[in-house]
Image: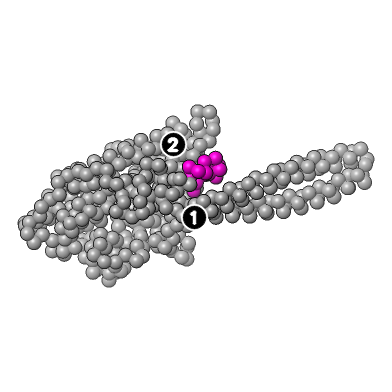
Amino acid sequence: MLQLNYIRENKDEVLKRLSIKNFKDAESILNAVLEKDTARRNMQKDSDNLKAEANQIAKQVGELMKAGKKEEAEHAKAKTGELKLKEKKFDEQLKNLEDEIHSLLVQVPNAPSLKVPGGKTPEDNEVVFEHGVKPTLYANAKPHWDLTTKYDLIDFELGVKIAGAGFPVYKGKGARLQRALINYFLDKATAQGYLEIQPPIVVNEDSGYGTGQLPDKEGQMYHVGIDNLYLIPTAEVPVTNIYRDVIVKENDLPIKNCAYTPCFRREAGSYGKDVRGLNRLHQFDKVEIVQIAHPEKSYEILEEMREYVAGLLKELELPYRVLKLCGGDMSFASALTYDMEVWSAAQQRWLEVSSVSNFEAFQTNRLKCRFKDANGKSQLAHSLNGSALALPRIVAALLENNQTEIGIKIPAVLVPYTGFDMIV
């Protein structure tokens, strides 16, 4: 959530940045917010003056009683009672105004960095880097959904029987490859100073609100109605919420966490060839990296996180490219996002496998995650996260790109984790 003080002092800049996200209602909503905030501040002054007057008269009651001026004391008590009733009305009106301001602010997405390119669709994203050579496959090479059947790695139909479409069952070397990737990603993250966390995979409304999934993405989250909990769409949600209502030490920044979790997304409306096989699932595995950072360092850290994810893709010997997302393709909460895509040789297209984002103070303002600077002043930290990595499309690309006529070759970096170098 954008900070009210920042909007008040930098309205034109905020509007300029929101225009990059093509947020059409920005000016009307911000005007309404500032108008209500002015009314709230004026009312707060009147309320404070009223309370000061009531406190002053209350002190006089005791003095009048001591002086034997009972009638004047009773009059003063009656006046205090009248002022208390007015105070109560002021408090109710202030609470209503604060709720109205809050309900408007949560409709406003994060203002993107001025580094974000303009545009409305994924076609407008900026390719900033590309690495690797796209493999040339042998004749009659297969897409991963056929390879998983041929080598008995994943049973999509069994998943439909047990749960529904988008819930695959991993088997044998397919399950072992999943576990190998998870352990590899976690080992790499902890070697880079990330503290491993094993969080809950359900969260409450406060947690969903804190990281910006609510009230923006209710339709994409699985809701456990009887308990009013949500299955997590990413480990970002529970891990970042560790720091909700927390004042961290400035010397501890940046705080680095990683976590493996299953992730759940309804993906309502998804259909067609682009969602076949592992391309788009309702349940999938992912290792997430999260940082709580000093505001002056967050964009430097974003670049470090981007390079870290790129390093994983290099070790997996996958051709990849890095995209800077345009305003129209960014998430509600992000200020700047890089997407990582790997080349799918059998499908002849790029597959997104990671998003690395800086949220600036958008999440931490909701979370009330702060630190005290050298002067003892409380400041909002910045939050960042990234997929490092999401498994389904990594597996799809590994299977497709490394297929040969005698089997599927496992990248050398994974062999110590899988215990085999070929799937045959």
43 horizontally vs 240: left or right: right
Question: Can residue 25 be found in the magenta stretch?
Answer: no
Any mark on residue 161, and which? none
Q: State the CA–CA distance, disc 2 to disc 1.
A: 28 Å
Residue 177 at least partly seen: no
- Residue at which label 1 appears: 25
Report the magenta stretch's main SS. Answer: helix
**Residue that protrudes farthest toward the bottom in the picture:** 161
Q: Nearer the viewer, residue 332 or 203?
A: 332
Task: Answer whether residue 200 is visible to the viewer in this image.
Answer: yes
2 or 1: mark nearer the eye: 1
The residue at 27%/43% (across/down) is: 128
In the image, 24 versus 248, the foreground residue is 24
Chain part drawn in magenta:
1-14
Looking at the picture, which amino acid does disc 1 mark? Asp
Name the quarter where the C terminus is drawn: bottom left
| Residue 5 forms part of the magenta stretch | yes
Q: Earlier in the sequence, mark 2 or mark 1?
A: 1
Indicate the position of residue 276 as horizontal and vertical percent values: 24, 64
Q: Which residue is mark 2?
A: 295
The amino acid on which the numbered mark 2 sits, given as a three-letter code, is: Pro
Q: Position of residue 196 (x, y in %)?
A: 34, 43
- Residue 164 place in picture, x, y as percent: 30, 69
